[in-house]
């Protein structure tokens, strides 16, 4: 089995279920201007020969995937199949890790709306995360193991990060997840159309003592995480720009203020703050503080 007319077969991985063995592989179509597919194919019990035809699962069809998908890693979690894969050029910061889900091993698979790990989701601390695998340690915790370039692109190394499951969707510790403010619980505040906001909407008029925006966020493991708030601050006092703030609470406990330097209306910037999260789901609330600020989104890493 080597489809020479499609660039050959590379990036094999193995999967077993109910006493049956399967091989996953990629046709190397990017070598010669063709599509790349990730395939699933049944094997004999000892893995020495194929016993059926290959089924195409996914191919490159998203702009962020560039010319290829590769490195298939199947995992079953909570009755759902999760197919991790890498995409784009491994030699630079464009390499990324994505995933697709299905209710059957053979598919059809639905890709997640955005990649799981990228240079940007790690804030440039490492570049081009991909070539992933998923392992379960002796403590029963899942981890994702992958390679990537150092932040200065001087060396390539192997990394490991805690992997959690938010309603059967993977979350990687250290790889930021975005939560839009307009999708959060909004109390005595206003969702408005906002130029330059990530989804074109933001939450403003958190002007009252009981105004707040409350997010439900997921942490792959407990401990210190980074909260990034994307905000706009057009506040002024006596005609002069001023710093504003929100009061922060995490799981019902006060966690101090989050301060926002002046930006002007619809000029979105971000600030970071360290917070302590429990493993699993957490509640993060931003409430009325000093002066006025609008919320576009938060990120948890």
Image: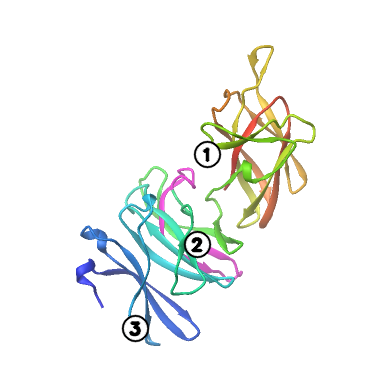
- Residue 142 drawn in magenta: yes
Mark 1 touches mark 3? (CB < 8 Å): no
Badge 2 or badge 1: first in the primary sequence: 2
Q: Residue 138, image x and y in percent?
A: 58, 71
Q: Which residue is mark 2?
A: 144
Q: Residue 186, image x and y in percent?
A: 70, 41
Indicate whether 121 appears above or below 97: above
Q: CA distance from mark 2 to mark 1?
A: 28 Å
Give the SS element for disc 1. Answer: loop
Q: Which residue is mark 1?
A: 198
Q: CA distance from mark 1 to mark 3?
A: 46 Å
Quarter of the image for residue 286 reads: top right
Q: Which residue is mark 3?
A: 52
Q: In terms of depth relative to the viewer, which is nearer, 61 or 248?
A: 61
How is the rendered protein coloured? Answer: rainbow
Q: Residue 244, image x and y in percent?
A: 67, 26
């Amino acid at each position: 089995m080597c489809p020479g007319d499609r660039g050959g077969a590379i990036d094999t991985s193995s999967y077993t279920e109910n006493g049956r063995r399967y091989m996953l592989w990629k046709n190397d179509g990017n070598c010669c201007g063709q599509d790349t597919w990730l395939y699933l194919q049944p094997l004999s019990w000892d893995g020495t020969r194929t016993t059926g035809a290959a089924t195409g699962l996914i191919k490159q069809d998203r702009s962020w995937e560039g010319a290829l998908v590769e490195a298939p890693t199947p995992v079953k979690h909570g009755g759902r199949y999760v197919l991790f894969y890498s995409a784009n050029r491994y030699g630079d910061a464009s390499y990324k890790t994505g995933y697709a889900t299905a209710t059957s091993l053979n598919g059809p698979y639905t890709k997640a709306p955005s990649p799981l790990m990228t240079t940007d989701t790690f804030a440039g601390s490492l570049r081009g995360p991909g070539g992933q695998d998923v392992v379960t340690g002796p403590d029963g915790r899942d981890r994702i193991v992958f390679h990537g370039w150092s932040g200065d692109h001087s060396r390539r190394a192997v990394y490991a990060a805690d992997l959690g499951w938010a309603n059967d969707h993977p979350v990687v510790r250290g790889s930021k997840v975005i939560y839009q403010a307009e999708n959060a619980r909004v109390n005595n505040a206003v969702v408005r159309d906002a130029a330059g906001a990530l989804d074109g909407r933001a939450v403003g008029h958190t002007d009252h003592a009981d105004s707040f925006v409350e997010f439900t966020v997921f942490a792959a493991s407990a401990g210190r995480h980074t909260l990034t708030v994307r905000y706009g601050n057009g506040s002024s006092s006596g005609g002069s720009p001023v710093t504003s703030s929100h009061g922060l609470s995490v799981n019902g406990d006060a966690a101090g203020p989050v301060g926002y330097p002046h930006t002007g209306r619809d000029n979105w910037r971000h600030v970071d703050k360290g917070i302590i999260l429990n493993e699993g789901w957490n509640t993060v609330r931003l409430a009325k503080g000093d002066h006025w600020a609008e919320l576009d989104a938060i990120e948890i890493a």
